[in-house]
Amino acid sequence: MGTRPEIDPKLKSALELGPVLAFVVAYALLRGESYEIAGRAYDGFVVVTGLFVPVMAAASFALWRLAGRVSRIQITTLVLVVVFGALTVWLNDERFFKMKSTIVFGLFAAILFTGLARGRSYLEYVMEGLMPLRHEGWMRLTRRLAWFFAALAVVNEAIWRTQSTDVYVLFDTFGQTGAMFGFFLSQSRLIETHWDDGPDAS
């Protein structure tokens, strides 16, 4: 059986974070402007969304070609980005792309809660052994992450409905990334407690 090709960590990070950073930069340059395309006026956010979708798709394809795989979470996110991005451009309505994160986080929360109700940790299945935790640890981490995703869905919905597009863009990019980093950092004690060293551990 062939092994998966190794990918440089810096290149992997560039492919994963590059499209998001490009989105922020492009929005900063085009915000507040209106652009006529094929006889129809689009504001800067919609134009940037139309550019972001193919860039993210290309980055995901490149990651798949280089690494031999992409995670299920990345695939699901890409599909929703394409769908809601296309709706945003087609209907010329930025609300569709803004509600994307609500759907993404809400879907992930629902999936994790469904697994918990069945006595299973779908998080363990998705992460495919990247963290060797005991079953109890996976269940506790999954429960916490499910509630965290549900909270992010609610916060995203509140922000895009009540705040300016500028605030939404900052939250959708840096805010969510920082929140995810902070969440997993806060779970270090749980991970350490339930770390499974395997049968050979002394």
Image: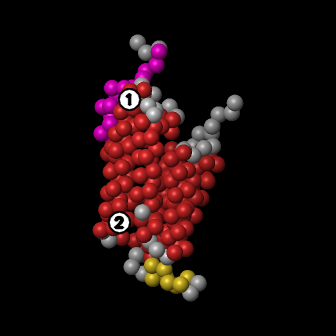
- Residue 189 is covered by the magenta coloring: yes
**The N terminus: image quadrant:** top right
Task: Give coordinates of residue 188: x percent, y percent.
Answer: 33, 34
- Residue 92 is covered by the magenta coloring: no
**Front residue of this view, candidates 67 and 36:** 36
Q: Is residue 157 above or below residue 16?
A: below
Is 190 left or right of 196, judged from the image as shown?
Answer: left
* Residue farthest toward the bottom in the current orientation of the protein: 39
Residue numbers of the magenta segment? 185-199
Q: Is residue 162 above or below residue 57?
A: below
At mark 2, the secondary structure is: helix
Mark 1 or mark 2, which is nearer the start of the sequence? 1
| Amino acid type, mark 1 | Gly
**Front residue of this view, candidates 88 and 128:** 88
Identify residue for label 1.
Answer: 137
Question: Count of labels shown?
Answer: 2
